[in-house]
Image: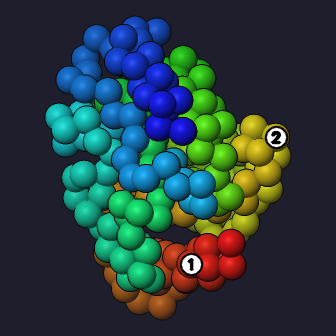
Amino acid sequence: MYEKLNDIRQKCLSCNKCRLAETRTNIVFDDGLPNPKMMLIGEAPGFYEDKEGKPFVGKAGQLLDKIFASVGLSREKDVYICNTVKCRPPENRNPLPDEKEACWEYLQAQIDIIHPKIILLCGNVAVQSILGNVGGITKIRGKWFDGGEIVHGAKLMPIFHPSYLLRNDTREKGGPKWLMWQDIQEIKRYFDKL
Ligand code: URA
């Protein structure tokens, strides 16, 4: 598994299929053990990720670590983390359709190699890449989806992106943080049954 992932990583290192290659500092390929139980797909690297070459290391990443830790899951050991695109879009804009398309082969290869049982789709960009137009994140978060062949039958759950939670900090019942807490508990219940 490590060798296969490394082959794909090497391909990304020399990739210049889209304009994001021109402005990247580092490719941001993955983090965490290639754990076949659970994978998380985020949107795209930001400023700190581009600098360090590792996904979710900025403020959003720190919140993500806390969310996993709140139910006893370890970011390092229990989840394999990657993004829909491997290079940072300028000014942290959303990746454009042709950029996502250019990078798709790498994400598909990661899914094929890891063959995860659960895939967490973190935010709208990740949801659209895998599930297409199934509705906005506020409507579909917390629901299990069957992803079909491209994900080898994995169970998919859309979840709020931690940057959204940072911008919507209220802890009140029914608010984004409260909903995230419901979702991570459901994810943990399913994870424990695997
Ligand atoms: N946001 C993402 O979606 N991915 C990262 O790696 C960092 C921030």
Q: Amino acid at mark 1?
A: Lys
With 59 as the anchor, is 109 left or right in this view?
A: right
| Label 1 SS | helix
Q: Are marks 2 and 1 in contact (CB under 8 Å)?
A: no
Foreground pick, 74 / 121: 74
- Residue at the (30%, 58%) spot, across then down: 61
| Label 2 SS | helix
Rendered image quadrant of residue 85: top left
Query: Does residue 82 appear in this view?
Result: yes
Rendered image quadrant of residue 64: bottom left
Dot label at residue 149: 2
Image quadrant where one finds the C terminus? bottom right
- Total tally of numbered discs in the picture: 2
> Which of the marked residues, 2 or 1, is nearer the chain's N terminus?
2
Q: Position of residue 39 (x, y in %)?
A: 54, 54
Q: Residues within 10 Å of mark 2 (few under 14, many from 20)?
A: few
Foreground pick, 70 / 123: 70
Q: Amino acid at mark 2?
A: Glu
Residue under numbered circle 1 = 188
Rendered image quadrant of residue 20: top left
Foreground pick, 2 / 106: 2
Q: Position of residue 182 (x, y in %)?
A: 55, 83
Foreground pick, 22 / 111: 111
